[in-house]
Image (spheres, grey):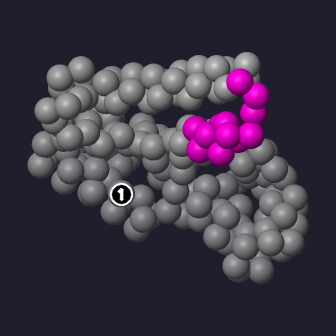
Amino acid sequence: MMALLTHPTMMKANLGDYERILGITRHQPTVTDCASALINSAISQLFLTLTCRLLRATQNPSPTGRDVQLVEAFHSLIENDLTSRTPLTDYLKILNTSERTLRRACLRMALPSPHEIIQMRLSSEAQRLLLFSGLSAVEISERLGFTDPAYFSRWFRHRHGLTIRAFREEREMK
C-alpha cells in the first residue's frame, strides 16, 4: 500500500467503474434506510476493486526511456503502414527487438499487447472510414488490407458487437 501512496502511478482507466459509482451515489439520497446499507456496500466494493487495480499497477516497474522510444517507434510503424496488414513479426524485425521486449515495454507503459494495439488501430480506422468516407464495406476491407470482405465483417462484429450496417445506422441516428 505504501508504494501506491509514495509513487504516482498511471493506469488505464475504466470509466465504467467510475460511472457505476456515480450512478449509485446519485440514487442514495432517495432510497430507504435498508437499501442504503446495500448501496454503501456496493460503493465500497467498487472502490476496493479500483484500489486493487492500482496496487497491481504499482508492482510493475516504471517505463524506461528505451521503453518509451520503442513503443513510439512501434506506433509510428503502425501509422505509416496501416493498410498493408503487416504481421507483428515484420515490425519486430524493423525495430530489431523481440516480441517479449516490446510486450514488456507496452506493459510498463500500461498499454495493451502489441497485437492488440494493432487491432485497436485497425478498428478505429475502420470506424472512421465507415462513418466519413462513404466507401462500401468491401472497399474499406480492401483499403485496410483484408483479403476477404466476409472476414472483415465478422472481425468488425466481433470487435464492436454490431454489424457494419447496424454501426452505420446507429451513428446516423445520433
**Image height check: is 108 above or below 166?**
above
The quarter of the displayed image where residue 129 is located: bottom right
Q: Does the magenta segment cover residue 163?
A: no
Residue 104, x across and y down, in percent: 28, 32
Query: Where, quadrant-wise, is the C terminus in this rendering?
Result: bottom right
Nearer-the-camera pick, 4 or 113: 4
The tally of labels here is 1
At horizontal 27% and vertical 57% (from top left) the residue drawn is: 73
At horizontal 65% and vertical 63% (from top left) the residue drawn is: 126
**Image height check: is 65 above or below 84?**
above
Query: Where, quadrant-wise, is the N terminus in this rendering?
Result: top left
Q: Does the magenta segment cover residue 32?
A: yes
Residue 167, x across and y down, in percent: 81, 60
Q: Main secondary structure of the magenta part?
A: helix
Q: What element carries label 1?
A: helix
Nearer-the-camera pick, 109 or 149: 109
Range of residues picked out in magenta: 21-33
Q: What's the residue type where badge 1 is placed?
A: His
The residue sitting at the front extreme is 33
Nearer-the-camera pick, 130 or 137: 130
At horizontal 12% and vertical 49% (from top left) the residue drawn is: 65
Judge from the rendering whether residue 122 lies leftward or rightward of residue 131; answer left or right: left
At horizontal 61% and vertical 40% (from top left) the residue drawn is: 25
Judge from the rendering whether residue 112 lies leftward or rightward of residue 37; answer left or right: left
Mark 1 sits on what residue? 75
Judge from the rendering whether residue 145 lies leftward or rightward of residue 110; answer left or right: right
Residue 105, x across and y down, in percent: 25, 39
